[in-house]
Each structure stands twice: as C-alpha cells, then as structure tokens.
Image (cartoon, rainbow, N blue to C red):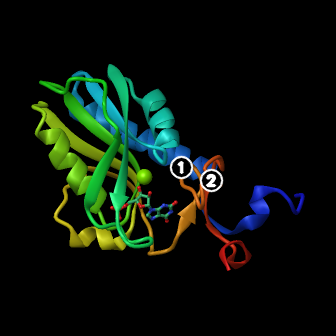
Amino acid sequence: MDSNDVESDLKHVLFSKEQIQQRVNELAAEIDADYQGREILLVGVLKGAVMVMADLARALHSHITMDWMAVSSYGSGTQSSGVVRILKDLETDLMGKHVLIAEDIIDSGLTLSWLKANLLSRGPASVEICTLLRKPDAAKVDIDVKYVGFNIPNEFVVGYGLDFAEKYRNLDFIGTLAPHVYE
Ligand code: XMP
Ligand code: MG
C-alpha cells in the first residue's frame, strides 16, 4: 500500500466489503418479503446514501423506482439540531406510493425523524426507513426504523458513502479514521 493511498488514513476496518454486501443482501430479502410484490419508491438521501441505494436497489427483486433528496441540518458544529432545510426535493409525487427511505447512518435521528414526517405529509401509502448503520444516540428519538444493517458504537466512521470533509466516500468498506487525519 502506498502511503498516499486513502487506506493509510484509516485506523481500523469496522465492516469489510463482503460483510456489507452480505448484510445489504439480507436486508433486501427482508424488504422483498415484506412488500410482497408491491412497487417501492426508494428515496436516497444525498450524498451519503449513494452506495447503499446502488447496492440495495440491485439486490431487490421487487419493482422499484428511485428518487433523491438532499437536505441540510442546521446546527452548531457536528451536532444536528433537527431543523432541516431541503436543498434538493423529490421529483416524484408520493401520493399512494410505498416509500422506503435509504440512509447510510442514523446518529441523533433528528434529520430522519423530520424527513419521515415531511414525506408522510405528502399522502404516501407508507413510509419506512432502511439504514445501513445506526449509532446509540438514535435510541433517544422516537423514530421507527424498520430496517437496520448494523448497530455501531458512537465513533466517527467513513467509507461506503460516508465522508470526512467530503473524502473517503469511495471506500468499499467502512472504517474509523486514524488520528493523524483530523488532529
Ligand atoms: P442525525 O440527524 O441522525 O444526522 O444526527 C445523521 C447525519 O450525520 C452525519 N453523520 C456521520 N457522517 N460518519 C459520517 O461520515 C459518521 O460517523 C457520522 N455520524 C453522523 C451523516 O451525514 C448523517 O446523515
Ligand atoms: Mg447522510
């Protein structure tokens, strides 16, 4: 490994490419069984959810359509406040649709709890959430997350869509950063 490779910025691997793929396939099988042939509108939250969306969509056998939203959460520093601004809205009318939000990670849960309420107000048949990762703080918010890939400790993670200063999204595994990167 070259010392300039992005891999040299990582402290340790939390989930390998193979572990992620296996878990995403399991989630897809669960989702297919639950929706029983009903069409699903997958809503990806940019940018973190791009990898989950791409892999989940390909693992599903149900008929799906895909749309994207970008939101920004107002807050001081790294703490999200629950006050959310829509940067890019959906192009799809949600009336009567079975909406499944695909997310990379739920931390405080404030962003997603706002997003779910917002989508529910548009007249869909249902709104559920699928997240690859969930941190312990999410338990403090009353939000029903039907599909969770992995529960993780309260550590900052990158890779597979997740970034630090917009970098590391392209890693095919999920890991923690080495201290030299952020110190
Ligand atoms: P909430 O509202 O659930 O916000 O607190 C979730 C958003 O916070 C970001 N986030 C992370 N991003 N590694 C990241 O790359 C992490 O460990 C992490 N924890 C939270 C992310 O944007 C997520 O959508
Ligand atoms: Mg995100």
**Above-or-below relation of 126 to 80:** above
Q: Is residue 34 left or right of residue 157?
A: left
The quarter of the rendered structure image containing the C terminus is bottom right
Residue 30 on image: x %, y %: 31, 40
At label 1, counting other C-alpha atoms closer than 10 Å, the crowd grade (few under 14, some 14-19, many 20 or more) is many
Residue 179 is marked as none
Q: Are marks 2 and 1 in contact (CB under 8 Å)?
A: yes
Amino acid found under the numbered disc labelled 1: Ile
Q: Residue furthest right?
A: 2
From the Cβ of disc 1, is ligand 1 less than 8 Å away? no
- Foreground tag (2 vs 1): 2
Q: Nearer the viewer, residue 113 or 18?
A: 113
Q: How many marks?
A: 2
At label 2, counting other C-alpha atoms closer than 10 Å, the crowd grade (few under 14, some 14-19, many 20 or more) is many
Query: For the point 27% across and 46% down, which residue is it?
Result: 129
Residue 52 on image: x %, y %: 47, 42
| Disc 2 target residue | 173
Residue 92 on image: x %, y %: 27, 23
Residue 162 on image: x %, y %: 54, 54
Q: Nearer the viewer, residue 164 or 76?
A: 76
Query: For the point 65% across and 69% down, which residue is it?
Result: 177
| Disc 1 target residue | 20
**Above-or-below relation of 61 to 115:** above
Find residue 137 and report its image quarter. bottom left
Q: Is residue 71 left or right of residue 59?
A: left
Q: Is residue 180 left or right of residue 124?
A: right
Mark 2–mark 1 distance (CA, rounded to whole Å): 7 Å
Asked which secondary structure carries label 2, the reply is: loop
